[in-house]
Image (cartoon, rainbow, N blue to C red):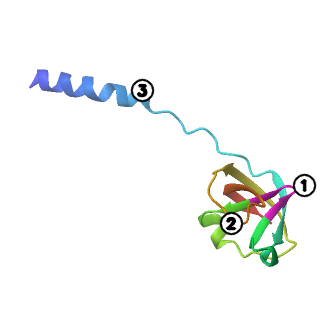
Amino acid sequence: MRRHSLLLMAALLPLAFGCQKNAEGPSCDTPATVRNLRLDGCGVVLELANGKYLEPHGDLWQSYAKKDGAKVTIGYVDEPMASVCMAGASVRLTCIEE
């Protein structure tokens, strides 16, 4: 019985020390403006302060009530994917605040 306990402890020990806190995600500090580019075949995108566009996707973007011209603050991570629009980089939003 003692041998089984030692084997179990030896097997579980790496798990105890292998767990790390998740690194903090991208901060929600990038100003952007919601732009409706549907006439260009793009749909709704985000325009950054430097004039570049982002093509957001993901659950957070889908659930956001998009209004052309709305000023928002976002956090995002690059997630390249195929796009018909090709107006800007494909990203997944990690946060969006008005």
Q: Find the residue positioned furthest to the right.
A: 50
Secondary structure beneath disc 1? Answer: loop
Whether residues under marks 3 and 1 lie with C-beta atoms below 8 angstroms apart, the answer is no
- The stretch of residues the image draws in magenta is 46-54
N-terminal of the pair, mark 2 or mark 3, is 3
The residue depicted at 67 percent of the width and 66 percent of the height is 61
The residue depicted at 70 percent of the width and 52 percent of the height is 76
Q: Residues within 10 Å of mark 2 (few under 14, many from 20)?
A: few
| Disc assigned to residue 21 | none
Secondary structure beneath disc 3? Answer: helix
Question: At which x and y percent is residue 26?
Answer: 69, 46
The disc labelled 3 sits on which kind of residue? Phe
**Does 51 lie within the magenta span?**
yes
**Residue 66 vs residue 20, the one in the foreground:** 66
The residue depicted at 74 percent of the width and 60 percent of the height is 86
User: How far apart, in angstroms, are the residues tagged by discs 2 and 1?
Assistant: 23 Å
Q: Mark 3 — residue? A: 17
N-terminal of the pair, mark 3 or mark 1, is 3
In-image side of 36 versus 9 (left or right): right
Question: Is the C terminus in the top left, top right, bottom left or bottom right quadrant?
Answer: bottom right
The disc labelled 2 sits on which kind of residue? Val
User: How far apart, in angstroms, are the residues tagged by discs 3 and 1?
Assistant: 43 Å
| Disc assigned to residue 84 | 2
N-terminal of the pair, mark 2 or mark 1, is 1
